[in-house]
Image (tube, grey):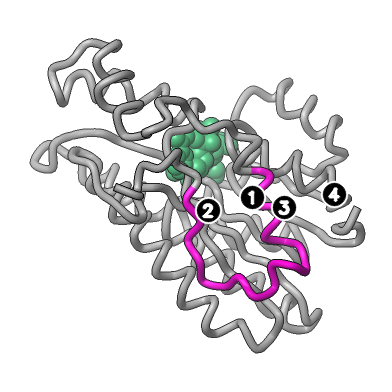
């Protein structure tokens, strides 16, 4: 239980990857704080399971991030994981979707970090873990906002790593390939439309075609990586971008 006494805030942790990271950090003794939206009953059950607080702030606005950080209090482990996707050709990409994706998938991580770092510096220990994506390293068509935000968070992570290294604070990205979560499931209809494909073709020729393993990544695998990055053995892993993508970006 090496994270006993440490508080971890995981944004976007009411489902998918964020929830798996919360479960994994809790299993190592951390107090976890959940954020995100969803069915109230399901969220209440998860809070019970993890003995966790849930702060349902909308992180697409600076005010929402500030509300989250004020309610959370000092955090030792910050996991910037909340994210959304939209799939459309660039000339049809709705401007408001671009703004929302940049705000949530990129800007929110800057705002949480700037508010979390003072306590980490005082404590002389901290971990910032950003759920980036294989799309922080490689692009796919029709995902202009997502790919831009994810490349951006990889750059933000490196900057944080350089600035915070003297204070025993590390900042790293975890970059999954395709993980079967609502975020992936929900993009299938728009991908079918953008590419003129059937659901089966999108699954096999677009999603799994990227991953040499021909398998989706499991959320628990991402959770295990987050735990490792919190360990003392990871104190010299800083500014790195950890691919968990079945070999996608090795190509
Ligand atoms: P998900 O849809 O299961 O989870 C997204 C989480 O973000 C949910 O908890 C949701 O409530 C929350 N959220 C959405 N809008 C929000 C907002 N405005 N404010 C606060 N929270 C909000 O998706 P996921 O696949 O688990 O995605 C988690 C992260 O992993 C995202 O950053 C995503 O880009 C990244 N990622 C996912 C995959 C994948 O294949 N699923 C691959 C690479 C990276």
Residue matched to label 2: 174
| Disc 4 to disc 3, C-alpha distance | 8 Å
**Is there a contact, CB below 8 Å, between mark 1 and mark 2?**
yes
**Is there a contact, CB below 8 Å, between mark 3 and mark 1?**
yes
**Is there a contact, CB below 8 Å, between mark 2 and mark 3?**
no
SS at badge 3: helix
Residue matched to label 3: 227
Q: Residue at x 36, y 38 (%)?
A: 85
Tell me if residue 131 comes above or below residue 94 in the rendering: below
Q: Residue at x 45, y 38 (%)?
A: 246
The crowd level at tag 2 (other Cα within 10 Å; few <14, some 14-19, many 20+) is: many
SS at badge 2: strand
| Disc 1 to disc 2, C-alpha distance | 8 Å
Q: Residue 250 carries which label?
A: none
SS at badge 1: helix
Magenta region, residue range: 223-243
Q: Which mark is residue 225?
A: 1
């Amino acid at each position: 239980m090496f994270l006993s006494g440490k508080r971890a805030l995981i944004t976007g942790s009411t489902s998918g990857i964020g929830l798996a990271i919360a479960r994994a950090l809790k299993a190592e003794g951390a107090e976890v704080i959940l954020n995100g939206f969803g069915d109230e009953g399901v969220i209440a059950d998860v809070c019970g399971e993890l003995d966790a607080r849930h702060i349902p702030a909308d992180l697409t606005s600076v005010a929402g991030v500030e509300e989250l950080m004020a309610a959370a209090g000092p955090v030792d482990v910050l996991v910037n994981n909340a994210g959304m996707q939209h799939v459309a050709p660039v000339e049809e990409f709705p401007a408001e979707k671009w703004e929302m994706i940049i705000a949530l998938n990129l800007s929110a991580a800057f705002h949480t970090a700037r508010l979390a770092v003072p306590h980490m510096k005082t404590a002389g220990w901290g971990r910032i873990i950003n759920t980036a994506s294989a799309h922080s390293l490689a692009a796919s068509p029709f995902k202009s906002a997502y790919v831009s935000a994810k490349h951006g968070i990889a750059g933000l992570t490196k900057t944080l790593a350089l600035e915070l290294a003297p204070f025993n604070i590390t900042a790293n990205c975890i970059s999954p390939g395709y993980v079967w979560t609502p975020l992936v499931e929900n993009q299938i209809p728009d991908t079918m439309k953008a590419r003129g494909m059937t659901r089966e073709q999108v699954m096999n020729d677009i999603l799994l075609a990227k991953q040499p393993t021909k398998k989706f990544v499991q959320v628990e695998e991402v959770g295990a990586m987050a735990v490792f990055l919190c360990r003392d053995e990871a104190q010299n892993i800083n500014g790195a971008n950890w691919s968990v993508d079945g070999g996608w970006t090795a190509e």
